[in-house]
Amino acid sequence: MKKSREIILADKAGFCFGVKRAINTAFKAAAGGKVYCLGPLIHNPQEVDRLRREGVETVDDLKTLKPGDSLIIRSHGVPPSVLRQAHDKDLTIIDLTCPFVGKAQRFAERLQIEGYRIVVVGEKKHPEVQSIIGYAGEDAIVVETPADLEGMKAQRRLGVVAQTTQSYSNFSEIVLELLRLSKELKVYNTICNSTTERQNATRSLAGRVDIMFVVGGRNSANTTRLVSLCREEGKPTYHIEVADEIRQEWLQGASKIGVTAGASTPDWVIEGVLKRLREGHTSKQPVR
Ligand code: SF4
């Protein structure tokens, strides 16, 4: 007799407000003619392919664009220098910077004006962090983990903002260290609620199941963070982008399977994974 399996989707999973807004606006804009997006609109290769088919083309820089072309600024935002470049080229700007990222940019700008040296807690190469740094002044620093602060000299005034997808635990550990390293510390907690909700729902689900699937782009920071959280809970965890990657041997002995997804994972991809797990047809091919 076939053993029954319970498949449970996390209470909060998939597109957040900022990504939903960006995707809907991009599709609408492309209905009126081709539009260009500086960098992939979201960190999900399957959705970026769908956008391309509908007329949203990804470009790496502004060099090839002509006056009048429509340029999407994605939810991660861009530094002010890029906005100036786009204006100088007479591009039509569709600014889809998430309002929560915009807030972090404004706090960084304000702290700089007030004379603080700015610390951005986040991933150095992430486009959102690059966009915030653009508002933070030349002496701003990016800190990923408390270890990055080793050897840092004490500062008179430090101002802190976070990449919106940071975990509270990492942010608070760094802030605690910075307290030791500064005479005056001003902190803006710019972590986004959607991120916290997804992380909490994932952690709670991981505690109740045998194995976890995290669905989303391998290039998505918030998705890979969900993978780390599940592993911190001690759960066997598989990071997949699409249903075809699921392998039979992963499911051996698992009666409760948890599924969660990053803020940039579209519903149709999540549905595909749930369907495949319910039907029990899996790939026998090795995964990347
Ligand atoms: S995770 Fe939060 S800050 Fe980032 S795009 Fe979504 S709503 Fe905006």
Image (tube, rainbow, N blue to C red):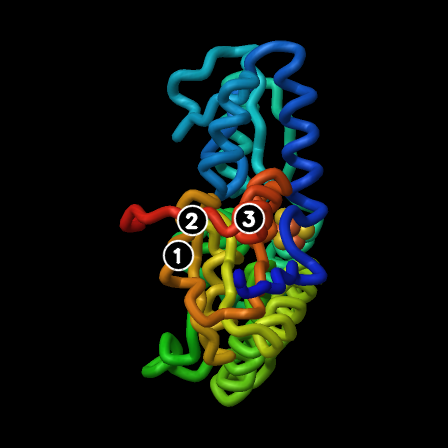
Q: Secondary structure at mark 3?
A: helix
Q: Where residue 248 is drawn, which disc sits there?
A: 1
Residue at the (66%, 19%) spot, across then down = 29
Nearer to the camera, 241 or 171: 241
Q: Where residue 282 is drawn, which disc sits there?
A: 2
Residue at the (50%, 60%) spot, across then down = 213
Residue at the (63%, 56%) spot, across then down = 104
Q: Amino acid at mark 1?
A: Gln
Using the image, determine if residue 157 lies above or below residue 224: below
Could you tell me residue 265's position as x and y percent?
57, 46
Left or right of 15? Residue 220 is left
The residues bearing labels 1 and 3 have C-alpha atoms spaced at a distance of 12 Å
The single residue placed furthest to the front in the displayed view is: 1
Q: Callout 3: 10 Å neighbours few (<14), some, many (20+)? A: few
Could you tell me residue 118's position as x and y percent?
52, 65
Could you tell me residue 162's position as x and y percent?
57, 64
Q: Where does label 3 land, which residue?
A: 279
Q: Amino acid at mark 2?
A: Thr
Sequence-earlier tag: 1 or 3: 1
Tell me, yes or no, if residue 227 can be seen here: yes
The single residue placed furthest to the bottom in the displayed view is: 180
Nearer to the camera, 242 or 6: 6
Residue at the (54%, 22%) spot, across then down = 56
The residues bearing labels 2 and 3 have C-alpha atoms spaced at a distance of 9 Å
Left or right of 38? Residue 102 is right
Check whether the beta carbons of the residues at disc 2 and disc 1 lie within 8 A of each other: yes
